[in-house]
Every structure is written in structure tokens, then in C-alpha cells.
Image: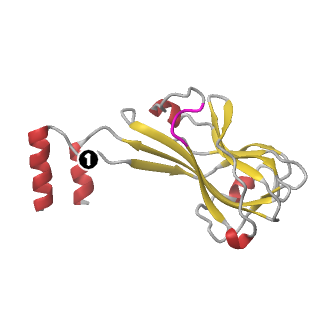
Amino acid sequence: MRFLFFILIFALIFGVAPIYADTQTRNPITDEAVSGTWTGSVGTRFTVVDDYPDTAGTDELVHGTTTAGNLTFTAVPFVVPLDATSISVSVKYYDYKNGSQSASIAGRLKVSGSYFASAAHNPTNGAANRTQRTNTWATNPNTAAAWTPLEVNAIQAFGWVATDVNPSIALSSVQLEVTYTPASNFQEFLLRRIN
């Protein structure tokens, strides 16, 4: 209780409250677009990767080896407060490749009707080396400016895009995440500390 008392005094004297970051996550709920060679059934691939974090690869989608392409999903929209700042968006997933040759895959967002890829990477080789990836957009790739709450609440799809899938790439789960700073709200801060 002393801690809360000192925080209250600090806020009254300086007129500020501590700022904290908040996070929301979304799992895929439908397939949005697909190209290239993928395992899984048309229209239901999201059900294979909607279990983030699937660190063991309980179920996986495999992309390749015939044709590289993309796979994106829709999600329930975010509800980021309209006064939020310092917004970033991430596509988080687990992957590995099935061979020693190089391959290339990246996270992907659909914003305002256009698709945007993160920097691509070469996955590690073999299921025993399944690796968690986080591809982050600190700014809106459509505008190159800071994300606004309305923009992030209107993200249309997320997933992957690949340019080299020979050897094939296995993906066990995917999740969309937004991190932001809500406006300073001392009452909300106290409620979080008490609970």
C-alpha cells in the first residue's frame, strides 16, 4: 500500500502518471489470399496455424517446393484506443526449412488494400531447429509514417510471402500483435496495480 501512496503523491505533485505499454494479439480466423504450393485444404489453412505458440509443430503448413508464393489470413480487428501512441505491429510465427540449401520467407501485412513484406530470412534447417520469428513494422508501411490507431484497427490481413521454397519451409503457427502506449491514465494505472 505504501507504494501506491508514493505513486499517488508523485502524480499529484508532478501531474503525471507512469506510462506503460499494452499489447493485443490476434490469431487467424479465415484464409485471405494464397498463391504458390501449400499443404492444407483450400479455405481452411488458417485452422492449422491458429494455435500460436505451437513450439512443437503439432500441426504445420508446408510451403514449396514447386512454386513460391504467399498465404495471408484475416483476423478479428484490433481495438486500440484512439489516444494511443508509439504503435508497432508484428507478425509472429515459427518456421524451419527441410534441407540445407537456402530458402527465403518473410512476414506480410495487408494495409489499405496493398501488401507489404518485412525483411526476408533463411530459416534454420530441420524440425529440431524450429525457430520463433517476429517481423515488426514500427511505422505504417503504406504511409511510411507512424501508425495511427485507426490504421492499425483496420489492418486487413497478415501472414507470409516467400521467394525461394526449395527446400520447402514448414510453418507451425502465426499471430498478429500490436504494441502501443495508451494515454496516461492514472486511474487505470492504479487499477492495474491493485489487481
What segment carries the magenta color?
137-141
Number of labelled discs? 1
* Residue sticking out furthest to the right: 66
Q: Is residue 172 above or below residue 127?
A: above
Can you give x and y, in whole percent of width and height, for residue 116 in the image?
66, 36
Q: Is residue 42 magenta?
A: no
Where is residue 26? Give x, y as percent. 55, 50
In this rendering, the answer to whether 93 lies above or below 12 is below
Give amino acid for label 1: Glu
- The quadrant holding residue 39 is bottom right
Q: Locate residue 194, reporting x and y percent.
A: 22, 59
- Colouring convention used in this rendered image of the protein: secondary structure
Residue 171 is left or right of residue 186, and the answer is right
Q: Which residue: 65% across, 71% down?
A: 56
Q: Nearer the viewer, residue 18 or 101?
A: 101
The answer to whether residue 184 shows anywhere in this view is yes
Magenta segment, principal secondary structure? Answer: loop
Q: Residue at coordinates 45% horizontally, 39% vertically from top-left?
A: 87
**Residue 82, placed above or below residue 62:** above
Around disc 1, counting alpha carbons within 10 Å, would you say few (fewer than 14), some (14 to 19), or many (20 or more)?
few
- According to the picture, the residue beneath numbered tag 1 turns out to be 188
Give the residue drawn at x 10%, y 55%: 5
Residue 122 shown left or right of residue 168 in the figure: left
